[in-house]
Image (tube, rainbow, N blue to C red):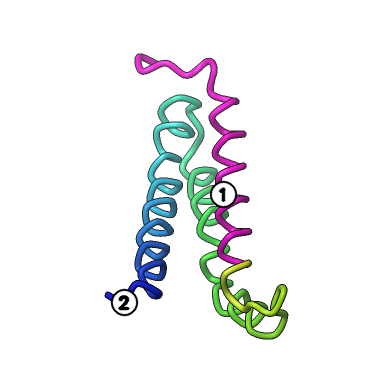
Amino acid sequence: LVKDLIGIPINYFSVGVIYAGSVSILYPILVIQNGVDASFFAAAVSLVTLFWSFKIFFGLLCDTLPIFGHKWKPYVVIGWVLCAAMLVVLASMGDDVSPTT
């Protein structure tokens, strides 16, 4: 791969890991630990995957409103900063989680 373009496959791989992880963690937390019913679980999965459907609109936003003259890079950085911040918030909320319950 060309050195300038290596970030694109790395970004798509990372998005896939985060996307799959966010969907697969819902079952153990919601159903096993909290005992929610199937309809609530299905609604939670739909909510998590909802923004994947808006990919085309985010692409249009990036193309029409560049930040500091750049179309894609600032939006990718903003997205990863928001993702990291939310992961830190979620990690700080997990004090009472144990592997046996």
User: Where the C terminus falls, by quadrant?
Assistant: top left
Tag 2 and tag 1, C-beta contact below 8 Å: no
Between residues 21 and 63, which one lies in front from this camera angle? 63
Name which residue lies at 57% across and 33% down: 90
Three-letter code, disc 2: Val
User: How far across and how far down the image is residue 72, in percent?
Assistant: 57, 74
Q: Residue furthest left?
A: 1
Q: How many marks?
A: 2
The answer to if 86 sits in the magenta stretch is yes
Three-letter code, disc 1: Cys
**Is 63 displayed left or right of 97 in the figure?**
right
Residue on which disc 2 sits: 2
Is label 2 or label 1 in front? 2
Name which residue lies at 46% across and 43% down: 38
Considering only vertical position in the picture, is 66 above or below 84?
Answer: below
Q: Residue furthest front?
A: 3
Tell me which corner region of the image, top left, top right, bottom left or bottom right, holds residue 60: bottom right
**Is 8 displayed left or right of 30 in the figure?**
left
Q: Which residues are magenta?
A: 75-101
User: How far across and how far down the image is residue 85, in percent?
Assistant: 61, 42
Is label 1 in a helix, a strand or a loop? helix
Considering only vertical position in the picture, is 47 above or below 101?
Answer: below
Name which residue lies at 40% across and 46% down: 21
Per the rendering, the mark at residue 83 is: 1
User: Where the N terminus falls, by quadrant?
Assistant: bottom left
Between residues 22 and 80, which one lies in front from this camera angle? 80
Secondary structure of the magenta portion, mostly? helix
Which numbered disc flags the more N-terminal residue, 2 or 1?
Answer: 2
Tell me which corner region of the image, top left, top right, bottom left or bottom right, holds residue 51: bottom right
C-alpha span from label 2 to label 1? 27 Å
Is label 2 in a helix, a strand or a loop? loop
